[in-house]
Amino acid sequence: MFTDLPRDDAFLQWTWPDIAQYYQELDALALDADALEAFLRQWAGLSDCLTELQVRLHIATTIDTADAEAKERFERFLAEIFPPSAQAEQRLRQKLLASGLEPAGLQIAVRDMRTDVALFREANLPLFVREQALENRYYAVTGAQTVRWEGEERTLDQLHPIYLDRDRTRREQAWRLERARQLEDRGAIADLWREFLGVRLQQAANAGFADYRSFRWQQLKRFDYTPADSLRFQQAIEEVVVPAASRLYEQRRQRLGVETLRPWDLAVDPLGLPRLRPFETVEALATTAARIFGRVDPAFGRYFATMQREHLLDLDARKNKAPGGYCETLPYAQRPFIFMRAVGVHDNVQTLLHEGGHAVHAFEMNALPYGTLHGFPGSEFAEVASMGMELLASPYLAAAEGGFYSDADAKRARIEHLESVITFWPYMAVVDAFQHWVYEHPADAVNPDECDARWAQLWGRFMPGVDWSGLEREQRNGWQLKLHIHVAPFYYVEYGLAQLGAVQVWANARRDQAGAVAAYRAALALGNTVALPELFAAAGARFAFDAATLRAAVGVAEDTIGELSEIRDDL
């Protein structure tokens, strides 16, 4: 019935004429119940190939932001393949919806298709391409940021171990050096910001929306909560978590014996202990992480070993590597790929466990039929996979359990992580509230000085406890440093909601680790076949925004910190 799709990675060399023939055959098919299965499988296979082609080209631009050839290949894809393929995908979605057929197991995917059909505007295709090009320019600016430290050129990530140094003067020097380098690019990032805003506002207008937030909410398939729920979550964080975070900051200030807590005082051990040194090489990081994943569930260990064997990990820090960390799914190969920048600190361990959770999610979804046609579950739950893995893996951080540390240092690492869970929620609220303000007041937000002022106001609301006196310029510039604000608008509240779900999963694990892991794994395997509240419920959690649920989560984190502190102090 159809021309065979490639059985190897030949699709990585595709041009649009190579691809068009497959869409033409799908367009020409008379779609009825008898033809549905073949239609879906061919469409899914084609979509998997195209998605993997785009993902691999994008990965190449992040592993070396100075690679002109990789940049040119990706931009050629965006210019020559993305627009006609997006139009072809739109025709197939319309064809399926017009047939009235309801494929079993694809109810959520069909709901999402209806939304995509409603949002699609041909005029937006070049704007999506331009937006991606702006993202690449942002990565190029930030990826090139280096400093001279003790006679050596270092990436900004490579300064981070210094923030764990017991010498406060040394920490301050490194912190100021990093922020000064970031401020050098303030003008370049401000110029990109204005372009980002213009492109996004035009996308919304083209699709018939009065504002970008409403458009983006639909684009992100947020059917289970509203902007008002997001604002309610911010208020709950202000009520419940800000006081808890302030208690942690005050305890840290007292233990450090300083008059006020400064930004360079937030990572160092407050008891004056040497910094945690979990690994010396990225090979050691990966090998030890593999053992930990296997302790959480033997299948998870096998998944990670596959990634090691197939070179699907890029973990080291180097110049011209894009900022941040991610896990991308390669749907044709049915493999995930993890990217990060490791510099030998405990935060790197957490990052690899986090991205490993995404990787496990990808492996667990491989059993679902129709590949990328299912779509991916909302990030509100996808991040439960990653944040939940961080917490489920925490009992295995000690070397006696296969991990990185002595028993005492494993306790330190767990305390550090749980404290970061608490202090993260207020920061998440700053980022989320800032983005709501931006797209509610775009005429003001196009001015970087107005953005500075709003960021400072929100920082004061959600982030008390740290003294920024004399550092107002650096504080106000914080919005420029948050990657998500620039390249993934409105993508941040997911982390806060997912953290709340992950803590609930972990609370279950404190009572029954095996049972909690089994529920977590079963929920991951559902993919995008049920709605968010059902995914959370399958994992043993509740999809929530309220103060009571937050209070219970903060309570279990604080209680565990207390228990671990007592045990650690006795060792």
Image (cartoon, rainbow, N blue to C red):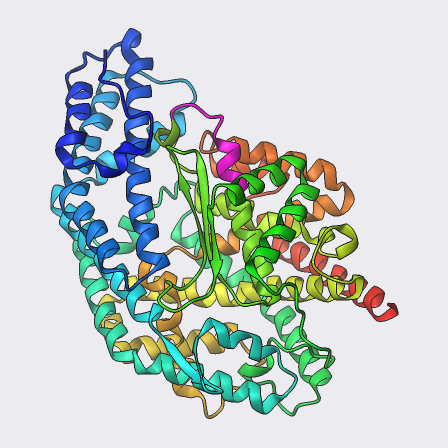
Which one is in front, 227 or 11?
11
Can residue 499 be seen from the camera position used here? no
Residue 149 versus residue 40 in the image, above or below: below
Q: How many numbered circles does the render carry? A: 0
| Residue drawn where x is 57% and y is 75% of the image | 161
The region drawn magenta spans 360-370
Residue 478, how many percent across, how many down?
Answer: 40, 75
* Residue 100, picture quadrant: top left
Q: Is residue 491 magenta?
A: no
Residue 404, how many percent across, how many down?
Answer: 69, 59
Residue 196, how many percent across, how many down?
Answer: 23, 62
Q: Is residue 377 left or right of residue 62?
A: right
Which one is in front, 317 or 380?
317
Which one is in front, 92 or 286?
286
Can residue 512 be seen from the camera position used here? yes
| Residue drawn where x is 73% and y is 67% of the image | 412
Which one is in front, 84 or 246?
84
In the current view of this chain or complex, which residue is farthest to the top? 34
| Residue drawn where x is 17% and y is 40% of the image | 81
Q: Is residue 343 left or right of residue 38?
A: right
Image quadrant holding the N terminus, namely top left
Residue 180 versus residue 9 in the image, above or below: below
* Residue 89, picture quadrant: top left
* Residue 260, picture quadrant: bottom right
